[in-house]
C-alpha cells in the first residue's frame, strides 16, 4: 500500500512509524511544510511542501512581531500548503493518509484532497482537548466537518486522549503507542558505587520544558552530598530562556556537574542514552513526549511529570516514576528513590526494557495499522 504522512513539520516521533510501514513492504512518503533543526529523517522520502502565497504573507507579517523562534498558535493554525500538495496526491496516489494536523488549515486542505483522491485518512492526534477556543460547540462542529470529509479513524499515542475522545462520542478512535526499535544487545543497567549518577534530559529550550526545576533539584541533591551529574540536550527554540538557564548555573557554580548542550544532531543524542543511568522529563503541558520511549528502549528508568500525555508509558515504581509537575521536592524524592537503592534501580531498568519491548515494538505498529485499515 501507499502511505502518505502529512504534518506541519516532520517530528522524530513519526520516524519509526514510517520505517515500520516501509519495512512491512509498503511505499511511504512524508510531506511537510518545514523541517525542524534537530529532527531525524534518514532513509525516508521527505517531500517539502512550500506554504501557499497567502500563508507566506501572513507568516511574514507575524514574524515582524514574534519574539524568539517559536510560532504562535494562530500562526500554526493559519499555515496552509501550496498547490504542490495536490501534485503529491496526483503522483503518489496514496491509499492511506496519516494526517498529523488538527484543527488547522493544513488539515482541511489535506482532508479535501484525500476525499477527492479516495484516500483513507487516519487522523493522528496527541491533544486531549475537546474544545476550540474554550467552546465545546466549535469542537463538535469540527468533528462533524471531519466526518463529512471522510476521516476514516483517529489514532493517538496518548491513552488519556483515547479515553477523552471516547467520552465525547467519537467511536472510531484507536490507541496506538509510539514505537522505537530495541537493540538485540541491550541489557538492563546496574549502578556503580564509585561513579557519579548520570541524569539525562532532552527537550527544546522553552519554558514549558521546565529544565530549570530539574536543574534546581540536581543542585540541591548535590549540596546534600549525592554524587549526581546532569546533561541537558535541546534545540535552541527560546534564546532568552536558554540564557536564564545558563546564568542560573553560573550564579550557583554548578558548571562542574550540570551541562547544557544545544542543537546537537539526533544520532549523537541517541548515543547519550547509553552513557546515562536515568532519564528525566520535567516538562509540563507536554502533549506527547517521544523521548520517554527512546529512554525505555535503552533500559533507562524514566521520571516524568503528571502533566505529560505519554506518562501512560510509565508505571510508578515499576519502570520509573511520575512526579507532580513543577514540584522540585517531589522530583527530588523520585530521583532519590531511584538512585539510592541499587537493587531497586536494577529492577526499574529491567522492567523499562521489558515494557518497551512489549508495548513499543515497531512491528506491532505496522500490524496495528494494517488491521485498522482492513
Image: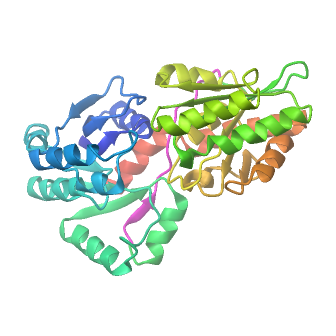
Q: How many dots with numbers?
A: 0
Quarter of the image for residue 224 reads top right
- Residue range highlighted in magenta: 171-185
Please say whether residue 174 is one of the residues in the magenta stretch.
yes
Residue 173 on image: x %, y %: 40, 64
The answer to whether residue 6 shows anywhere in this view is no
Between 260 and 272, the one lying in front of the other is 260
Image height of 202 relative to 101, above or below: above
Q: Is residue 53 left or right of residue 292?
A: left
Q: Residue at x 14, y 38 (%)?
A: 92
Image height of 203 relative to 263, above or below: below
The answer to whether residue 310 shows anywhere in this view is yes
Q: Residue at x 35, y 46 (%)?
A: 71
Residue 290 on image: x %, y %: 52, 42
Q: Residue at x 24, y 42 (%)?
A: 4
Between 358 and 241, the one lying in front of the other is 241
Principal secondary structure, stretch drawn in magenta: loop
Residue lying farthest to the bottom in this orientation: 137
Q: Is residue 192 left or right of residue 368?
A: right
Q: Is residue 219 left or right of residue 169?
A: right
Residue 95 on image: x %, y %: 20, 47
Q: Is residue 341 left or right of residue 312?
A: right
Residue 51 on image: x %, y %: 17, 42
Amino acid at each position: 500500500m501507499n502511505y502518505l504522512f502529512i504534518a506541519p513539520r516532520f517530528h522524530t516521533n513519526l520516524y519509526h512509524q514510517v520505517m515500520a510501514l516501509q519495512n512491512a513492504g509498503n511505499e511511504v512518503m512524508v510531506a511537510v511544510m518545514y523541517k525542524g533543526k534537530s529532527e531525524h529523517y534518514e532513509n525516508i522520502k521527505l517531500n517539502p511542501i512550500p506554504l501557499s502565497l497567502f500563508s507566506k504573507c501572513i507568516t511574514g507579517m507575524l514574524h515582524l512581531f514574534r519574539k524568539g523562534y517559536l510560532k504562535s498558535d494562530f500562526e500554526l493554525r493559519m499555515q496552509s500548503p501550496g498547490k504542490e500538495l495536490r501534485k503529491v496526491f496526483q503522483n503518489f496516489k496514496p491509499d492511506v493518509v496519516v494526517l498529523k494536523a488538527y484543527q488547522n488549515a493544513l488539515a482541511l486542505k489535506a482532508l479535501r484532497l484525500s476525499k477527492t483522491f479516495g484516500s483513507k485518512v487516519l487522523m493522528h492526534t496527541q491533544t486531549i482537548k475537546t474544545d476550540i477556543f474554550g467552546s465545546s460547540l466549535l469542537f463538535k462542529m469540527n468533528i462533524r466537518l471531519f466526518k463529512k470529509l471522510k476521516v476514516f479513524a483517529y489514532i493517538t499515542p496518548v491513552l488519556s486522549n483515547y479515553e477523552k475522545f471516547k467520552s465525547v462520542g467519537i467511536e472510531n478512535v484507536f490507541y496506538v503507542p509510539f514505537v522505537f526499535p530495541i537493540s538485540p544487545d541491550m541489557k538492563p543497567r546496574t549502578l556503580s558505587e564509585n561513579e557519579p549518577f548520570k541524569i539525562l534530559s532532552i527537550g527544546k529550550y522553552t519554558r514549558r520544558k521546565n529544565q530549570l526545576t530539574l536543574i534546581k533539584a540536581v543542585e540541591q541533591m548535590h549540596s546534600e552530598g549525592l554524587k549526581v551529574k546532569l546533561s541537558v540536550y535541546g534545540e535552541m527554540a527560546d534564546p532568552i530562556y536558554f540564557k536564564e538557564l545558563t546564568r542560573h548555573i553560573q550564579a550557583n557554580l554548578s558548571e562542574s556537574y550540570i551541562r547544557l548542550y544545544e542543537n546537537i544532531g539526533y544520532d549523537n543524542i541517541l548515543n547519550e542514552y547509553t552513557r546515562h543511568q536515568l532519564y528525566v522529563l520535567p516538562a509540563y503541558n507536554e502533549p506527547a513526549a517521544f523521548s520517554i520511549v527512546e529512554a525505555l528502549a535503552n533500559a533507562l528508568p524514566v521520571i516524568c511529570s503528571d502533566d505529560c500525555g505519554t506518562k501512560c508509558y510509565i508505571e510508578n515504581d515499576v519502570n520509573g516514576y511520575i512526579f507532580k509537575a513543577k514540584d522540585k521536592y517531589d522530583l527530588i524524592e523520585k530521583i532519590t528513590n531511584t538512585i539510592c537503592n541499587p537493587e531497586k534501580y536494577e529492577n526499574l531498568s529491567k522492567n523499562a526494557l521489558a515494557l518497551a519491548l512489549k508495548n513499543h515494538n515497531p512491528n506491532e505498529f505496522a500490524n496495528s495499522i494494517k488491521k485498522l485499515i482492513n
